[in-house]
Image (cartoon, rainbow, N blue to C red):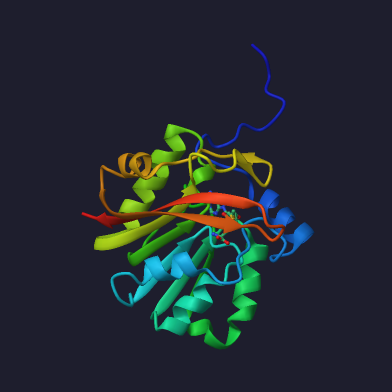
Amino acid sequence: MSTPTTQPRDPRGTAPATHWDGVYAERGPRDVSWYEENPEVSTRLVLRDGVPASVIDVGAGASTLPDSLLDAGVGHVTILDLSLRALSLTAARLDERSTALTTIAADVLTYGFEDVYDVWHDRAVFHFLTSAEQQGAYVAAAAGAVRSGGTLVLGAFAPDGPESCSGLPVVRWSAEGLAEAFGSDFTLEHTERAEHHTPWDAVQPFTWVVLRRR
Ligand SMILES: C[S@@+](CC[C@H](N)C(=O)[O-])C[C@H]1O[C@@H](n2cnc3c(N)ncnc32)[C@H](O)[C@@H]1O
């Protein structure tokens, strides 16, 4: 019998927090490929049903989506990310509105969600989950944390999008594929394609879906 030389990883785990902290430390929040000055698609889709009381942005990074949502009148925004460094940037930016913001440094796949939210938002996180086990754990977490009748707004690289991001492989998704992946608990309500332009003007096609929690 051979002896493992490295600690086995939690099979549901993705890249560790140190990877993502390192990316934000090395490049800064505005020089990462996913940076957008105005999170227009995300904001519009989160507000599609009106102004929700509570939103969770999963894998929020240092995105300005919480700023946009609070500006629009959303009551409370929770941001969850593996990277404490990214969360700290947003917490500092929104210091004056800290009572309306909760930060959670955790892995979405293993965090024990206790609250339920009106809207769950994910831009460019689900596509890092490359195994059925990881994807199933994510769907179960979302199903438990979105209230019945609430929505899940998700953007992932489209079938003609990049094959990797930040040095990690991704799964590229069609709207039909996402509807099927979440079909045990959510119904597809809306889909659209959007092209993200990186800070160096590379084009990244995204598939966006709005799914309703049954
Ligand atoms: C490509 S970035 C997108 C950030 C943000 N959603 C945006 O659009 O600007 C992916 C983010 O997801 C986070 N992340 C990756 N895997 C995660 C996981 N399993 N749990 C929580 N956060 C995760 C990373 O730390 C990173 O901030």
List x then y, in percent, for residue 53: 33, 77
125 shown above or below 13: below
121 shown above or below 127: below
Q: Quadrant of the N terminus?
A: top right
Q: Quadrant of ligand 1?
A: bottom right
Residue situated furthest right in the rendering = 26
Residue situated furthest top in the rendering = 1
Report the number of numbered marks.
0
Nearer to us in this view, 77 or 13: 77
Question: Residue 83: in sight, yes or no?
Answer: yes
5 shown above or below 93: above
Nearer to us in this view, 111 or 177: 177
Residue situated furthest bottom in the rendering = 96
Question: Residue 115: in sight, yes or no?
Answer: no
List x then y, in percent, for residue 207: 44, 49
| Residue drawn at (26%, 57%) of the image | 212
Nearer to us in this view, 198 or 11: 198
Is residue 205 shown left or right of residue 147? right
Is residue 177 shown left or right of residue 106? left
Q: Quadrant of the C terminus?
A: bottom left
| Residue drawn at (46%, 57%) of the image | 122
| Residue drawn at (46%, 39%) of the image | 134
List x then y, in percent, for residue 102: 49, 73
User: Quadrant location of residue 165?
Assistant: top right
List x then y, in percent, for residue 114: 37, 61
Is residue 7 shown left or right of residue 104? right
